Image (tube, helix red, strand yellow):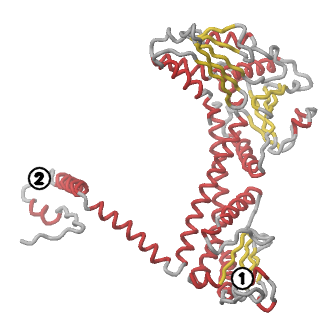
Amino acid sequence: MAYFNGGSRAVVDILSKLRNVEKPVPVDHSFCELGSIRYHIQVLESDQENIFFSISTPRLSQDEPNPNGLADFILQDIKTKYLNFADIIQPPKEGYKLTLKLNFSKLTRTKDHTKAINMVSSLHVAILNSQLKDTLKNVWMGDIIQGSTMPIKLVNHKQEPFFVLRAPKKITVIFPMRFKDESDVILATSFFQELADLGSKFPKAPHCEWSPIPPQELRGEHFENLSTNGGFVSFGIFKRHVKGKKADKTAWILLNFQQYVRYHVKCTKGFIQRRMRYRLEVLSEEIEQARIGGEAKIRKESTKQRKTWLRFSNSKKMKRGIKAFADQIKRLRLRIKIRGLGRLHRYFFHVPKFPALGWHAKLD
Amino acid sequence: MANTIRLYLTCIRNTLEAAMCLQNFPCQEVERHNKPEVELNTSPGLIMNPVLICRNEAEKCLIETSINSIRISMKVKQADELENILAKKFLRFLSMRAEAFQVLRRKPVQGYDISFLITNYHCEEMHKHKLIDFIVQFMEDIDKEISELKLSVNTRGRLVATEFLKQFI
C-alpha cells in the first residue's frame, strides 16, 4: 500500500527529525526502498544549513539517452516545482541520478515546511511520471507503421515489464501478468474479467481487455517477455487521459497497475482467511454441543454473561439515565394542559415506572 | 435443487444411524493396543461393506464401517476453477486444524476432499444423534460457505475494478 501513496515515509521521518533537532549534527544516511529506489541524505559539518539529498530511480526504458543521469526536460520539471527550497547540483553524487541542495530556512510557516518535505519524499514519483509522460508523448507523435508503432518495453519494477505502442487514435499499454501461485492466477483472472466487463459502465475510462494469449501487437517479442500465467491486460489510452493535469495521474496509475493487482489478490486472500476462521469457530461450537455435558458448559457461559449485564444495569449511572428519560417523557406528554383533563391524564397517560432489577420494596 | 440435496442428506443420515454401532475392540495383532480397524483394514471379518452415496458425478459420500470405527469421506461440488481453489483452501484449512473437531481426519482419503474418523471413544463422549447432526450440518455448511465465498470474491473484484476505473474520470 505504501507504493500507491507515492511519498517515502522514511524520507519524511528523516527530514522532519533534521528540522526539529535543537543542535544541528552531521548526518549521512543511505537507504534503499521498494527494491530499486536508492536515497542518500547528508548534512555536512561545515554547512549545516543545507541538506544534500540524492536519489537514484530504476531505468524505465532501455532507450534512455542518459542512463547515468536524468534527461533535461525532467531536470527542468523538477527545477520549476522545487524552486522555493531546492537547487540542483551538477554533476550528481556518484552512483545517483540526481542531487538536490535543500534549504528550508526560507520557509517560515510550518505548513509550507511540511508541504516541502512531502514534495521531496515524492521525488521518485515525479521522475517516473515525467519519464512515462515523455514516452507516451513520443509514442503519440511517432509514425504509424502498418497500423501501429513497434512496442516499447518499459520496466518499472524488477522482472515486470510492460509495453507501450501506438494504435490509430490511441496508445495501447499492455501488461503481461505473472503470479507465483495458481490460486493467485485464478483470483486475478476473475478481477481482470470484471475490469473488462465494466468498460461499458465507464465510457470515459480507458478501454480494458484481457486475453490469456499474447495480443497480436506483441507477436515478435522475446519468448521470456511473453511467457505468463496471468494473461495480458491491455488499456487503450486516449488523448483525453493524458491532457493537462490528468497526465500525471494516468502515468502514476499505469506505473502501479501490477502492484495494485497484487495488493488486491493479497487482500482477497486475507478476506478468505478471515471467513474461514469464523466458520471454523462456528463449527467448533457445534461439535462442543454434541459432547455429553457440552450443553451445560455453554449454558454456564451464557449465564455468566447475563450476570455481568445485570451487574451493569444496577449501577447508579444507569438509574440516573432511566430517571432522566422518564422525566422527559412526562414533560412531553403533559405540555398541553387542558382543564378537566387532568383526571384523564392520570388514568390513561401515566408513565410506567421502570422495574428495579434486584431492588427490594420498602416496608412502611 | 433443494429437494435433491435434502434426499441426499437424508440418505446419508439414515446410513450413519444404521452404521454407527461401535464398540470397544482391542487390536487382535498387537497386545494392549486399540486401533481403529477401518484404518488398518487387516481382518476382513471386522470390516463391513462400504456404502457409496452419490448425488451426482461430482458429489459423493463414502461410508466405511468396522467394529470399532467408522470413516466418512466426502467429495464436495466444484463447478469451476474458482470454486475448486476455494474448496481446496477451505477444506485444507479445516483439516490442518483437525484437533478442534476431534472427529476430523488430517488427511482426506484419496479421491475425496475431506474425511471423518469416528471411533467408539467418540461415541462414548458424545451423543450419537448429535454427532450425526453435526456431520450432516457440516456438509450443508461447506456447500453454503463455498458459494458465499465465491459470491464475495466476485463482488469484491467488481468493487475494486469500479474504484480503479473511477480514478480516470
Residue A20 at x, y percent in the picture: 47, 20
Number of on-image labels: 2
Residue A349 at x, y percent in the picture: 17, 62
Q: Which residue does the image show at 62% across and 28% down from the upper left?
A: A6
Q: Residues within 10 Å of mark 1 (few under 14, many from 20)?
A: some
Q: Secondary structure at mark 1?
A: loop
Left or right side of A12 for A263: right
Judge by depth and name the residue closer to the eye, A39 or B145. A39
Disc 2 from disc 1: Cα separation: 85 Å
Mark 2 belongs to which amino acid? Lys
Q: Mark 2 and mark 1, same subunit?
A: no
Residue bearing mark 2? A337
Q: Quadrant of residue B6?
A: bottom right
Q: Which residue does the image show at 65% across and 37% down from the upper left?
A: B164
Residue B87 at x, y percent in the picture: 71, 62
Q: Which mark is residue B35?
A: 1
Quarter holding the C terminus of chain B?
top right
Left or right side of B108 for A226: right
Left or right side of B23 for A50: left
